Image: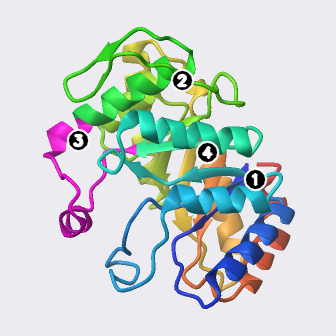
Amino acid sequence: MRIGFQITKFNYPDVHQHLAEIARMVDDGGFYSLWVMDHYFQMEIIGGPDDPMLEAYTTLGYLAGLTKYVKLGVLITGVIYRYPSFLLKQVTTLDVLSNGRAYFGIGAGWYEREARSLGFPFPSTRERFEQLEEILQIAHQLWRGDRTPYHGKHFSLPEPIFNPQPISQPHPPIMVGGEGEKKTLRMVAQYGDACNINMRSIDFVRHKFNILRQHCDTVGRDYSQIEKTLIGVAELSNGTQKIIEACHQYAELGVSQIIFGLSDYHDLKQIEQLAEEIVPAVQAF
């Protein structure tokens, strides 16, 4: 099993220096991946819109220049924020300049207050999922160098010229974020290389994986080809043994990567603790 690290807060002084230190510790600490969120102001459940929030792909470009090993991704990009060809150009640029370390995390989006407040369109749930499927189709087409005009219900690319191509082969891994059983997990099976599920409980994750397996059977996809990842918060106040035991249980379900965030990013010793006690302990799972 691999351990990823997600940065969800930027409310610390000297943010560029603090982020640089986090990046160095994650890269040197044996973590597999480093992630940021795709929001333009902070979610209420974490701190609220008055907390600072940095744009995701600019931040990842900065982190790419500070690291050598970790994969880099947005967990998860919302379909409403960027036109598909521009978004895929951002991901491809990140992949090229990081020497093949980009993930493409994509989902239907949900944060209506943020969109309305900043003037972004916020279509219906049905329309956002239609857009998500079209973006996934466009990603596969652009990344295989197919210049056939694309005309969907929501997006159109009359002459999809796309250079350079990514370093990652056949393309940056596509992570479809979300747990919806009818649409999201079906799109994971049909288009994705990875899923991302909340680390809520063993029974919850097992159920979602069973649904994903059913979708894979329906579309003719090999279930074992899909990377199963979880997202959670590392609560280190009671030590790391419970976290390690939980990782072992999830590994038995087929999870190969767990991405942890922290409740407090000011205390960098927590990253050291993850690197020293959890990252090596779960490698054999």
Magenta segment: 107-129
Looking at the picture, which amino acid does disc 1 mark? Val
**Disc 3 residue type (three-letter):** Arg
Measure the C-alpha gap from mark 4 to mark 3.
28 Å
Mark with earlier residue (3, 2): 3
Which residue is label 4 attached to?
255
Residue 83 image offset from top left, x and y in percent: 35, 40
Q: Which residue is mark 1?
A: 70
Q: Name which residue type carries label 2.
A: Phe
CB under 8 Å between discs 4 and 2: no
Q: Nearer the viewer, mark 3 or mark 2?
A: 2
- Can you say whether 266 is above or below 255 in the image? below
**Residue 120 belongs to the span the image colors magenta:** yes
Q: Which mark is residue 193?
A: none
What element does badge 3 sit on? helix
- Seen from the viewer's position, the closer of residues 180 and 113 is 113
Residue at figure coordinates x 79%, y 58% from the top left: 67
Q: Earlier in the sequence, mark 2 or mark 1?
A: 1
Question: Which numbered disc, 3 or 1, marks the residue that appears first in the sequence?
Answer: 1
> What residue sits right under mark 2 in the picture?
162
Residue 145: image quadrant is top right
Residue 65 versus residue 255: which sits nearer the camera?
A: 65
Q: Which mark is residue 128?
A: 3
Residue 167 is a magenta residue: no
Residue at 85% x, 72% y is 276
